[in-house]
Amino acid sequence: MSSLPVLLKTAVFTVVVPGTVVEGIPRVLARYDRESSTLDTRGARVVGAVSFVAGALLYLHTALRFSSEGNGTPAPRDEPDELVTGGVYRYSRNPMYVGVLLLVVGQAVRYRSVHVLWWGVVCWLGFHRRIIEFEEPHLREKHGEAYEAYCDRVPRWLPTGRPAET
């Protein structure tokens, strides 16, 4: 029962923040975009569906990791107490952001909207800047050598193929 508040806080954060990034803003952007025939091919629809499902599963896995392994939530003011390095965090230091970006790509195909694809680029640039300027310095300060060693083993964005040893 003690994990219920953490899971509830995670659910609320997920609806408000990633929900806005993945559903609210793309819906508005798509209204002002002509449907792209390039994003309406069978191949694009398959890529979009796979991207969306993979992104959703990746985000859910990472959010649950934050609560189970780190006793925290994705919300910056309720971050995990412990450095989360298990599961997909053995392959990428930022899989939650990767999951959100995959969801946005799926939405771009769903709406057949180039504007939403550009929104994904803007999101990635914003995520990258946040990671470099805030998250990494904060985690270095909070976790010290453990975070430095983790950074040495695990790439920031895309996995290299082999999981890092924890």
Image (tube, rainbow, N blue to C red):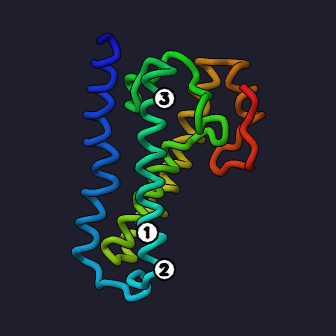
Q: What is the residue that sits farthest to the top in this orientation?
A: 2
Q: Tell me what residue is drawn at x 46 percent, y 77 percent.
A: 44
Give, as a three-letter code, the residue at label 2.
Gly
* CA separation in Å, label 3 and label 2: 32 Å
Which numbered marker is on residue 43?
2
The residue identified by callout 3 is: 65
Q: Residues within 10 Å of mark 2 (few under 14, many from 20)?
A: few
The residue identified by callout 1 is: 48
Q: Nearer the viewer, residue 57 or 75?
A: 57
Q: Looking at the image, is mark 3 or mark 2 earlier in the sequence? A: 2
Give SS at disc 2: helix
- Across and down, in percent, residue 59 comes to 44, 43
- Across and down, in percent, residue 94 comes to 57, 41
Number of marks in picture: 3
Give, as a three-letter code, the residue at label 1.
Gly
- Across and down, in percent, residue 9 comes to 29, 26
* In contact (CB < 8 Å): disc 1 and disc 2: no
Choose mark 3 or mark 2, whichever is in front.
2
Q: Residues within 10 Å of mark 3 (few under 14, many from 20)?
A: many
Q: Tell me what residue is drawn at x 33 percent, y 30 percent.
A: 10
Which numbered marker is on residue 56?
none
Give SS at disc 1: helix
